Image (cartoon, helix red, strand yellow):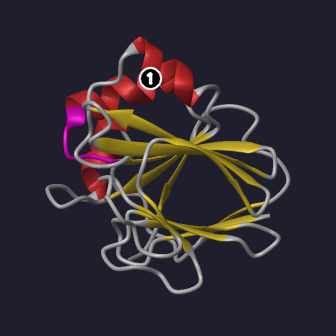
Amino acid sequence: MLTFTSPDGRSLLIETGNKTKLAFYPSKPVAGALNFLSKPEEEPAKDTISWPGEYDIGGVSIRGIGQNDGGHVSFVIEAEGVRIAILSAPLQEWSDHDLGLLGDVAVMAIQGDDPKIAQKVIEEVDPRVIIALASDKSSANDVLKVIGAVGMAPVPEWKLKGGLPAEGRQVIVLEA
């Protein structure tokens, strides 16, 4: 089972069934979690990943995808048989090569700071589940507008157990 929460509405915290905690783009490090940053740091703090590359930690396969010559990093992970993309803000244009690195994504967390890019990426990736997040320049509603799901009620957490939706697309908004 995977549990998704958002400590601040902008970051994403994923906890796996074996209690591995992964914090994506937190405003401050999350204790007890592996923290992922969107900008590479020369000497990242302990339990921090900020560079493109491939990692395997706690039974989770992780790929950091660098854009803008590696100066901007988004991540795709595979945990418990589910491929999850967590795109960092500000959203960048995604080349065919970068989209190929994402692979067959089932769950995508995305921020809506650029609605045109968000819509394009969502259409090209076509995930079964979208987790709408805020960014410095946008709210989760900006993502919801792009996908026609305005008015979704935020939930404190979302648990993925068993399978994904068989048809259609599920949209999740996490409480801050």
Q: Is residue 126 visible?
A: no
Q: Quadrant of the C terminus?
A: bottom left
Q: In the picture shown, does residue 171 fall above or below 92?
A: below
- 85 on left or right of 28: right
Q: Nearer the viewer, residue 130 or 86?
A: 86
Against 108, residue 50 (above or below) is below
Residue lying furthest bottom: 31
Q: Residue furthest top?
A: 96
Q: Residues within 10 Å of mark 1 (few under 14, many from 20)?
A: few
Residue 47, given in percent of the width and then of the height, sits at 53, 73
Q: Principal SS element in the magenta part?
A: loop
Amino acid under disc 1: Asp
Q: Is residue 165 above or below residue 103?
A: below
Q: Is residue 144 left or right of residue 153?
A: left
**Residue 165 rendering spot, x and y as whole percentages:** 72, 41
SS for tag 1?
Answer: helix
Can I make out residue 146 in this image? yes
Which residue does the image show at 36% across and 17% down from the upper left? 95
Q: Position of residue 98 (x, y in %)?
A: 44, 23
**Residue displayed at 45% across by 42% down:** 52
Q: Which residues, given as a range, are shown in magenta?
A: 111-115
Residue at the image position 30 percent from the left and 36 percent from the top: 146
Query: Which residue in the rendered view is the most extreme toward the left?
Result: 137
- Which corner quadrant of the image does residue 67 belong to? top left
Image point 58% across, 37% down: which residue?
169
The N terminus - image quarter: bottom right
Instruction: State the count of labels.
Output: 1
- Taking the image as shown, residue 25 lies to the left or right of residue 162, namely left
User: Foreground residue, 4 or 169?
Assistant: 4
The residue to which callout 1 is attached is 98
